[in-house]
Amino acid sequence: MGSIRRSLAFSALDSYLALVLQLASTVIIARLLTPTETGIFAVAAVFASLASTFRDFGVAEFLIQEKELVPQKIRAALALNIMLSWAMGLLLFFGAPLTAEFYRTPGIADVMRVQAFNFALIPFGAVTMAWFRRELDFRPILIAGITANTVSFIVAVGGALAGLSYMSMAWSSLAGVAVTVGVSLWFRPASFPRWPSLRGVAEVFHFGKFASGIYIFGQLGRGAPEIIIGRSHDMASVAIFSRANGLVELFNRLVLQAISPVCMPYFARANREDGSLKRGYLASVTYLTGVGWPMLAYLGIMAFAAIRIIYGTQWTAAAPLARIVCAAGVIELVHHLAKEALIAQGHIKRSNLLQMQVQGSLVLGLLAVIPFGLEGGCWGLLGGRVAGLLFAHRQLATTLGLTMGEVLLALRPSALLSLATALPLLAWVAVDPVNESNFWRCAIGGGVLTILAWLAALRWLAHPLWPEVVRIATVLRARLPPFNRSPSP
């Protein structure tokens, strides 16, 4: 358990330091670029992310879950990753003009061409990073993250101030990838295989052809709003939606990106050692919703204040959309770890099928109501999340023997906690509604009130998270320098 906590600490620190830099960059760039410029990068980034998902092809997951990871399998994974990465980079580079023509926006091609160069570098760091995750050694990942995010911040802000417009973010992405690869190679063990080999590629490919579908469908679902809105509306509308979705992404950076990298290795180890992960999965659901639901409730209630502070006055139209997207995030969080649990048990086909169902529901929901505008599209996303939740539970019931009663029992402490946390904030905004004159006071005061209410409710309700909070507080207190009130003689 100590290694899990240590890994979570490193992963959380990496995520939070990256979040600070990302927030600082976003605050500056949101005030330097117009919605149209932001939308151009957002659409191009969706296609780069989709190509990156094809590029990975489940190689990281293969390395993490493989019971006997011999050097030859690592070499084969590297070989497959190089072939796919370079192929995706070429596709992105030469497909850029067609994409720009489809959206009638030439700038998209310029961004995609720069992003294509990422794919020439990524394989040489991706396999090493996956090995670090397998070993639950998150220290090199932390160092790589801090360094890469710092460089990305400098390039993005410097480029925007220099007048590079949306290209500043494209160059920032390339700089971050280059630094990440360099740091991963620096920390690579001397015994780690350095050269690719075609022997054993078939085994990695067999695993990846199912595992990759999980993430391809996932990325299609995440990128569907920008892809559809960009074609049916315009680049400014894409940017408005992206800013609304940015609040949920803020939560993802605060919580999910710190937890998710550790969960799959943890589930895989539990499956290798105990042959079952049902208890661990239910505990993860309780912990995740115990943190996530109150945070999403705060972001939904304070959507106007959060968007006004982070993005500025030109983005306040995103606030009503953000509330709906936060509600969709609450639904999605219940079985957010379902695919990791299925992969850890070796159910690659089922996990692939689940992603098809979940993301297909999302796309269908969006297409059904996008003619009614951006708000209609957000309601479609919410409906898609509800359908995805039902599909996820069905797969988990089959593989883990998970019943709806067990899930509801695991969710009950977090539901009560979220209600107790949100009620004081709702009372606040009922008396003092958030507006242009008080958004700073509401955001800061409401944030402090939410944290205090959350801590009090954790203890009062004896939520399973409370012992962890006490343990963390005890560790921090022990590491602080002693405070001696009496003067030394």
Image (spheres, rainbow, N blue to C red):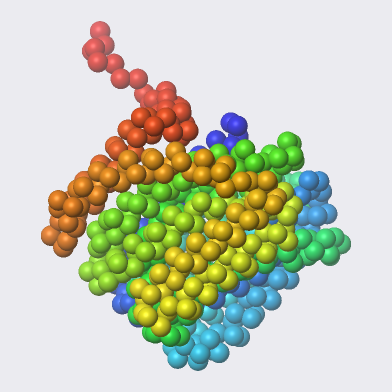
- Choose top left, top right, bottom left or bottom right for residue 253: bottom left
The quadrant of the rendering that contains the N terminus is top right
Q: Which of 138 and 299 is in front in this view?
A: 299
Q: Which of 453 and 234 is in front in this view?
A: 453
Using the image, determine if residue 203 lies above or below residue 280.
below
Q: Nearer the viewer, residue 372 or 452?
A: 372
Percent position (x, y) of residue 69?
A: 79, 48
- Choose top left, top right, bottom left or bottom right for residue 248: bottom left
- The residue depicted at 51 percent of the width and 44 percent of the height is 408
- Position of 247 with respect to 127 (left or right) is left
- The residue depicted at 53 percent of the width and 75 percent of the height is 364
Percent position (x, y) of residue 484?
A: 29, 16
- Position of 353 with respect to 411 (left or right) is right
The quadrant of the rendering that contains the C terminus is top left
Using the image, determine if residue 108 lies above or below residue 126.
below
Q: Which of 137 and 306 is in front in this view?
A: 306
